[in-house]
Amino acid sequence: MTEPILSLRGLVTEFRTADGVVHAVDHVSYDIYPGETLGVVGESGSGKSVTVMSILGLIPSPPGRIAGGEVRLAGLRIDKLPYDEMRKIRGREIGAIFQDPLTSLNPLYTVGQQLVETITTHLSMSSAKARTRAIELLASTGIPAPDRRIDHYPHQFSGGMRQRVVIALALAAEPKLLIADEPTTALDVSIQAQIISLLKKLCREHGTAVMLVTHDMGVIAETADRVAVMYAGRIAEIGPVSDVIHRPQHPYTVGLMGSIPTFGHEKERLTQIDGSMPRLTAIPTGCAFHPRCVHAFDRCSRERPGLLPAGTSMAACWLHDVTGGRAAA
């Protein structure tokens, strides 16, 4: 099998607060392979963005730190690298796209200056060749008249066009991994569709591994090959996107899928998950979801389930324990 571009093994990221230690990411493990898009979905506070910051080496310390596990990029362990070495990897080996493109672009410089600086910093290329490559990148991300627009400032672009510039920046040094954290949230639906199509095209043509973080299952369904569902800092379910959407195996995922309206299917009432996600300073023992789960039994409150085979997916639920399940309690 091809070596994964990104490999997380038992990743634990914690923050020290006045209320105690918060495990924002709690023993998370998964791989992403070349040319594959892994969608990471979950409610606000589920640990999606903290996972991203952990991979990028951007956890503020103090109060945060990676307390356990490891992060590997193409086999190289990167979670223990010094700041200067990790800074070289960001941009060169890992490209990042964030929700608000304005936070990724310097308003005082033209997009061309920013692209050329990124290219010459990470690649052995003259300024003239870097400018030519920058124009090609703008063209490949669907920006019209790139040879003219390259000299414009960020405020001269619409929100959707700014996001395209950010994608061009993220791809400038030909990274192995592209991390997109809520890349379409601030955009209207038609622009969202264009950005999704662009990400799929780039992944297909360049063999880049993509980690797509979002709360929008529609975006995941259109873009991802596999999906990881997070809950309270943990992976609740991971598997092929079609199977997770149409045949969810974890009660939390069942609730998520049931709460999404679908065209052509009339329902008097959408599925509702009672209660709310626990505070990270007060995560229940056993399965973190058990206080909200209609299928919970005694074992759920006592023992934390690991990821268990569940059809074509893996689900952290004792219902899938073939050694006993409910009877094992």
Image (cartoon, helix red, strand yellow):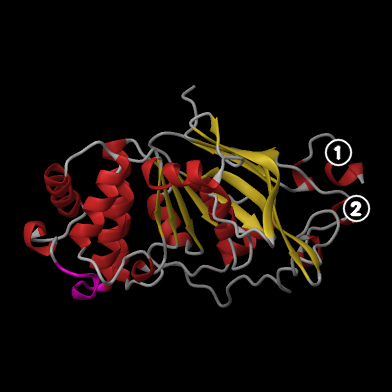
Above or below: residue 68 compared with residue 60: above
Above or below: residue 80 compared with residue 259: above
Residue 288 within the magenta-colored segment of the rendering: no
Q: Earlier in the sequence, mark 2 or mark 1?
A: 2
Tell me where residue 314 appears, x and y as whole percent: 64, 41
Residue 303 is tagged as none
Q: Nearer the viewer, residue 196 or 6?
A: 6
Left or right of 101 in this view: 221:
right
Residue 172 visible somewhere in the drawing:
no
Dot 2 alpha-carbon crowd within 10 angstroms: few under 14, some 14 to 19, many 20 or more = some
Among the 4 quarters of the image, the one containing residue 288? bottom right
Residue displayed at 16% across by 46% down? 127
Alpha carbon separation for disc pair 2 and 1: 15 Å
Query: Which residue is under mark 1?
Result: 324
Tell me where residue 219 appears, x and y as whole percent: 41, 59
| Magenta segment | 152-158
Left or right of 173 in this view: 70:
right
Tell me where residue 171 appears, x and y as whole percent: 30, 47
Residue displayed at 60% across by 51% down? 248
Query: Which residue is under mark 2?
Result: 302
Among the 4 quarters of the image, the one containing residue 238? top right
Residue displayed at 18% across by 58% down? 112
- Return the residue found at the far top: 1
Residue 193 visible somewhere in the drawing:
yes
Q: Secondary structure at mark 2?
A: helix
Left or right of 15 in this view: 204:
left
Left or right of 133 in this view: 255:
right
Residue displayed at 25% across by 45% down? 120
Name the amino acid type tagged 2.
Answer: Arg
Name the amino acid type tagged 1.
Answer: Gly
The reply to whether discs 2 and 1 touch (Cβ–Cβ < 8 Å) is no
